[in-house]
Image (spheres, rainbow, N blue to C red):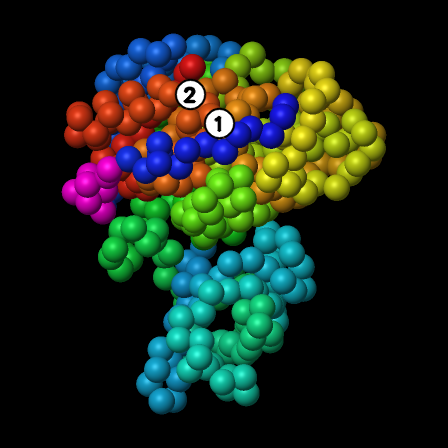
Amino acid sequence: MALPSAPDLQEINYHLPDERIAKYPLAQRDESKLLIYRSGQIQDARFKGLPNQLESGTTLFFNNTRVIPARLFFQKDTGAQIEIFLLSPVSPTHIISLMMEASGPVVWECMVGNFKKWKDDTVLKRTLEVSGKPVELEARIADRDNKQIEFSWSDPSISFAEIVELSGKVPLPPYLNRSDEPEDKERYQTVYSKQDGAVAAPTAGLHFTDEVLSELSQKGVNLNYLTLHVSAGTFQPIKATDAREHNMHSEQVEINRATIEALAQTERVVAVGTTSMRTLESLYWYGIRLMKDNEDFSIQKLEPYESDEILPSRQEVFQFMQEWMAKKGVEILTGKTEIFIMPGYQFRVCEGLITNFHQPGSTLMLLVWAFIGEDWKKVYEHALNNSYRFLSYGDSSILLP
């Protein structure tokens, strides 16, 4: 497909009153409202009724990433507070799942609050208590220009995941304009979260309960899981005049062979969340690379728009990938993607999307526009006029073009 013309960004800068932003989650996850968009028509329901909206044979693909308490606070001897926000791993590995298992020391690229007050030779220290015993945590600047911070701790029997769990705070989205509270530790997490590494929740999944998942299975809806570790870049507004020049964030993905097999065989693919959709569409383009003997799993933001050839079907691509993985003895694919889905994109994998209501002017708004066309305006107007709650802790929608 050819590179699309630049979308008019004023189109997606709709007015979102502050009172429509859900600052807190509902008491019961599946009591959230569900806007049903099917073939241009809109209905209102409750999320607990989702199983009634999906046909047997459909496969839902969930992002099972787990949010880590990525905000670490240290206090200097002078009293100044330094906040370190974990962004992406640098050393000893770039693979997030392995980094979380490390017994130290580790280096991360970070955002640092009060960075100017932290001198290069100053080691920041905190004492944590683990099973009644003190553990010393230290942070030092490894590379100021690249904002790389090294962490080390006194007990090598403790993993970095445990250190972060003990010392960090939940990285709530900045637009909530509030500090994290004890409830957020559990509620800003899906009930099926498993793989540590995200610094933002895949919020479409926050509405699911064990009961809803069970009902879906009983109805013959298949449940499958993949991993995309959501980065802080998901909140980055588009500042470029030409959206195509937006510095799209890169995120790490992990997919096992069972997921590839499901994609090759399922009748209908519905992505739970924009992160799952980005992963699934990126997988297709990785499959195209593999068919050309290119094993580099690093999907560039405009790569899907660079091909004008007739391309194989979803089933053909994933069948090839399945056979390639079996031949190579590969059980898990690890890669990264910065795919930019905007109006003009041709969807290769996803036929449905479960998603929340997104920030004005965001890349996620462009994705929704790309998926359901100009009807996105009708969907958002309906949500605004019918008391839907917006953003991360807000209500949900299922989009079935």
Dividing the image into 4 quarters, which one contains the C terminus? top left
Using the image, determine if residue 107 lies above or below residue 75.
Answer: above
Predominant SS along the magenta part: loop
Q: Which residue is mark 1?
A: 343
Q: Amino acid at mark 1?
A: Pro
In the image, 135 versus 44, the foreground residue is: 44
Q: Which stretch appears magenta?
A: 15-23
Position above or below: 196 against 289: below
Q: Could you tell me which residue is drawn at 68 percent across and 42 percent down?
A: 298
| Left or right: 385 as drawn, with respect to 253 | left
Residue 307 part of the magenta segment: no
Q: Residue at x 48, y 40 (%)?
A: 243
Classify mark 1: helix, strand or loop. Answer: loop
Tell me, for residue 373, which label it has, or none. 2
Q: Earlier in the sequence, mark 1 or mark 2?
A: 1
Residues 219 and 118: in front is 118
Contact between labelled residues 2 and 1, with CB atoms less than 8 Å apart: yes
* Disc 2: CA contacts within 10 A as few (<14), some (14-19) or many (>=20): some
Q: Can you give x and y, in whole percent of width and height, for residue 170 in the image? A: 36, 57
Q: Considering the image in quadrants, where does the N terminus appear?
A: top right
Q: Which residue occupies the foreground of this view, 38 or 6? A: 6
Residue 299 % position (x, y): 65, 39
The 10 Å Cα crowd at callout 1, few under 14, some 14 to 19, many 20 or more, is some
Whether residue 191 is situated above or below residue 318 in the rendered picture: below
The picture quadrant where one finds residue 37 is: top left
The residue at the point 59 percent across, 53 percent down is: 96
Is 340 left, or right, of 180 in this rendering? right
